[in-house]
Amino acid sequence: MRIRLRKIELTLTLPKSEDYGLTSQLRRSANSISANIAEAFRRNMLKDKNRLYTIARGSAFAIQSHLLYGQKIKYFENNVDNLVRSYNQLIFDLNKIMKSLS
């Protein structure tokens, strides 16, 4: 949750022209991660859990891509490497969960 809040704060600094572009993509991806993890946690069927964790992991990869793109075109004042590393850890953790379900 802390990662998500930092990322949403980061989107507040984006240009208004990105409201329906990068800003929207970052926020939707962050919401997708937490929603899919929460839904997977409540599911009983392993196949359903795995599918939802896979979707969450895909959204984490998407966020990393968006962050690196925003950094490359100098939308972000601060370096986003810490956030990218945080998402690497999340992806690693999701991979462990998915492996344990196999």
Image (spheres, grey):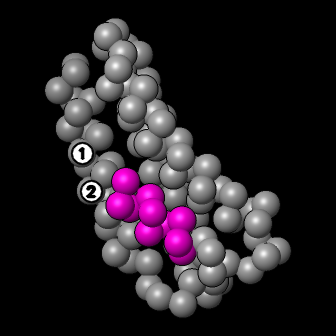
The answer to which quarter of the image holds residue 42 is top left
Q: Percent x, y for residue 25?
A: 65, 56
Question: Which label belongs to residue 46?
Answer: none
Residue at 32% across / 67% down in the picture? 85
Local SS, label 2: helix
Say left or right for 53 vs 61. Answer: left
Type of amino acid under label 1? Asp
Q: Are marks 2 and 1 in contact (CB under 8 Å)?
A: yes
**Which span of residues is magenta-colored?**
1-10
Looking at the rendered image, the quarter that the N terminus falls into is bottom left
Type of amino acid under label 2? Gln
Q: Percent x, y for residue 50?
A: 36, 23
Q: Main secondary structure of the magenta part?
A: helix
Q: Is residue 4 magenta?
A: yes
Residue placed under numbered mark 2 in the picture: 89
Residue at 26% across / 49% down in the picture? 92
Q: Count numbered badges in the picture.
A: 2
Residue 72 in sight? no
Looking at the rendered image, the quarter that the C terminus falls into is top left
Cα–Cα span, label 2 and label 1 = 6 Å
Q: Percent x, y for residue 94?
A: 29, 40
Residue 97 in sight? yes
Residue at 45% across / 63% down in the picture? 5
Say left or right for 21 vs 91. Answer: right
The answer to which quarter of the image holds residue 99 is top left
Residue placed under numbered mark 1 in the picture: 93
- Residue 32 to residue 66: above or below: above
